[in-house]
């Protein structure tokens, strides 16, 4: 169950790492539960641009998950879809454990692996090419060395593919709807919010077959060509998420050929 102390601690972490504006958006989601972009703007009294930028930071660092709520229409009405955002309290709390995480990886694997993982912890999500470029700029070895460290981390399940940008969820169950009404009456945060968070996380998570799958760009395909699964032709990261947020009706347009990786909490 989410407690007031847990929320306060999570907000303090976000404030220390990303500043007051991002923390205000995060606190709004932690206290009120899933909200649309417009609802966050109304609740925080920030500008739409400020909320969008804050959401971009929180999504990039795995602290917020976007999802599409598919609301089946009543009395013959058509289905309605809305993009909502939910704060991931567990992921936020994990941020204070990052130094310990790096120490464990350094002892179990090696320094190169720890340095590669540190980049993911600092930036939230990176493509393989971005990891290679970062390692080169820091003069931490060539492509072969970086790839070897990457494979070690992947085999040990210290890193994983990022979840889907906007999984689709159906209407909440009757039990969840009843609990939400109790929340509105009592003003308390109940376990139903955690239940919804779990549903969103599970819907977004790649299958086990894909979660730790690594295919290089030069791997031959069945037709004799090359696998472009890690192609960098589309700019990943902030621009990719910013374009997704610009659409009011559907904020989930993503390039599925860009594989983003993150630390496995």
Image (cartoon, rainbow, N blue to C red):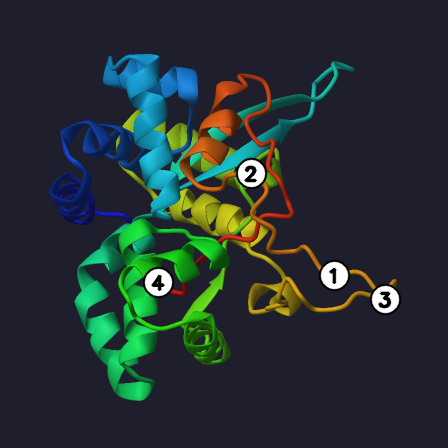
Query: Residue beneath label 1, please?
Result: 226
Q: Secondary structure at mark 1?
A: loop
For residue 166, the mark is 2
For marks 1 and 2, give the one nearer the viewer.
1
The residue beneath circle 4 is: 136
* Circles 3, 1 touching at the beta carbon (< 8 Å): no
Q: Marks 4 and 1, how far apart in space?
A: 24 Å
The span from disc 3 to disc 2 (Cα, nearest Å) is 31 Å
Tell me which label, 2 or 4, sits earlier in the chain: 4
Determine whether the residue tagged by mark 2 lies in a helix, strand or loop: loop
Question: Which quarter of the figure has residue 174?
Answer: top right
Image quadrant in which you'd find residue 181? top left
Residue 222 bears which disc, if any? 3
Residue 139 appears anywhere in the view: yes
What's the residue at 11%, 43% (across, down)? 16
Between disc 3 and disc 1, the foreground one is: 1
């Amino acid at each position: 169950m989410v407690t007031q102390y847990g929320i306060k601690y999570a907000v303090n972490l976000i404030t220390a790492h990303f500043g007051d504006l991002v923390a205000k958006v995060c606190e709004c989601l932690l206290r009120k539960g899933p909200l649309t972009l417009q609802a966050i703007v109304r609740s925080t009294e920030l500008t739409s641009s400020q909320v969008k930028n804050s959401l971009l930071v929180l999504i990039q660092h795995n602290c917020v998950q976007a999802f599409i709520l598919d609301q089946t229409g009543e009395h013959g009405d058509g289905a309605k879809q809305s993009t909502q955002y939910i704060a991931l309290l567990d992921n936020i709390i994990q941020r204070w454990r990052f130094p310990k995480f790096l120490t464990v990886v350094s002892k179990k694997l090696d320094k190169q692996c720890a340095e590669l993982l540190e980049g993911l912890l600092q930036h939230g999500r990176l493509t393989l090419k971005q990891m290679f470029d970062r390692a080169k700029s820091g003069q931490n070895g060539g492509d072969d060395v970086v790839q070897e460290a990457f494979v070690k981390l992947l085999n040990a399940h210290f890193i994983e593919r990022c979840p889907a940008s906007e999984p689709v969820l159906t209407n909440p169950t009757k039990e969840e709807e009843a609990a939400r009404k109790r929340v509105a009456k009592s003003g308390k945060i109940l376990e139903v919010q955690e239940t919804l968070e779990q549903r969103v996380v599970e819907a977004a998570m790649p299958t086990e077959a894909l979660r730790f799958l690594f295919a290089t760009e030069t791997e031959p395909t069945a037709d004799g060509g090359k696998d472009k699964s890690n192609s960098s032709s589309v700019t990943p990261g902030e621009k990719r998420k910013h374009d997704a947020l610009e659409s009011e009706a559907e904020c989930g347009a993503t390039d599925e050929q860009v594989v983003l990786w993150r630390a496995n909490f």
